[in-house]
Image (spheres, rainbow, N blue to C red):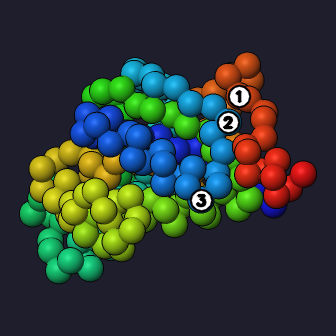
């Protein structure tokens, strides 16, 4: 099933000069770039990308942070002065917005069969130390899951990838105008798919 998904190369990926290496991972598996641009967003735009006004979402990222700390055998209360998921989530939302607005982002709309799952496999686990070699995060970052909390900042994990079809559709509409999206056939599509 052909579908579209959004990938953001975050400011750390842009600043490290590995944009081309990241993009080539997707093209090498046959995913097509339907749209791409570099943009430096503001905090209002970042707050649309991350649903920071939805209490359930904010609380869910706080709960995931608590689970991560437990998994690493650390005490989140020591680093964040709270164990309340919603309060942790609010802090994390602030950091996510600050990080996404700290430099230019390369926004890419990829198209292909099963593109959402394919991209997520290529990107790898959120935390670099858990991402397997061969994935973008496994090859280019080694950040531990709790290190960003200790530094009171968002995790620098190079890329964002849409998590599911609903998220991909929302992000496509947020990041790209209709006239920025192109329909064409890759050479391999013309050769093998007719």
Where residue 75 sits in the image (x, y, percent)?
A: 14, 71
Name the side, left or right, on which 30 lies relative to 17: right
> Residue 135 shows which numbered tag?
none
* Image mark for residue 29: 3
Q: Secondary structure at mark 2?
A: strand
Check contact, mark 2 vs mark 1: CB within 8 A: yes
Q: Where does the image place residue 117, in percent across and percent down from the top left?
A: 61, 64
Residue drawn at x 34%, y 71% is: 133
Residue 91: x and y, percent?
A: 28, 45
Q: Nearer the viewer, mark 3 or mark 1?
A: 3
In the rendering, at what x and y percent does residue 120 appear?
Answer: 53, 61
Going from N to C along the chain, the mark reached first, 2 or 1, is 2
Which label belongs to residue 34? 2
Q: How packed is label 2: few (under 14 Cα within 10 Å), some, or many (20 or more)?
A: some
Relative to 154, say whether 107 is above or below. Answer: above
Q: Residue at x 51, y 34 (%)?
A: 107
Instruction: Identify the image quadrant of the N terminus.
Output: bottom right
Q: Residue 139 or 98: which is nearer the viewer?
A: 139
Q: Which residue is tagged 1?
A: 181
In the figure, residue 74 lies in which quadrant? bottom left
């Amino acid at each position: 099933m052909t579908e579209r998904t959004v990938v953001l190369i975050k400011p750390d990926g842009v600043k490290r000069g590995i944009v081309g290496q990241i993009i080539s991972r997707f093209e090498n598996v046959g995913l097509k770039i339907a749209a791409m641009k570099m943009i430096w967003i503001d905090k209002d735009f970042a707050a649309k990308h991350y649903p920071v006004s939805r209490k359930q979402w904010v609380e869910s990222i706080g709960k995931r942070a608590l689970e991560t700390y437990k998994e690493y055998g650390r005490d989140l209360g020591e680093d964040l002065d709270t164990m309340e998921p919603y309060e942790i989530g609010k802090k994390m939302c602030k950091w996510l917005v600050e990080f996404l607005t700290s430099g230019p982002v390369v926004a890419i709309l990829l198209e292909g069969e099963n593109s959402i799952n394919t991209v997520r496999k290529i990107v790898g686990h959120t935390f670099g130390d858990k991402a397997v070699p061969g994935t973008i995060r496994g090859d280019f970052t080694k950040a531990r899951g709790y290190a960003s909390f200790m530094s009171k900042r968002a995790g620098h994990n190079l890329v964002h990838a849409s998590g599911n079809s609903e998220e991909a559709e929302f992000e496509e509409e947020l990041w790209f105008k209709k006239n920025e999206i192109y329909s064409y056939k890759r050479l391999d599509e013309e050769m093998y798919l007719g």
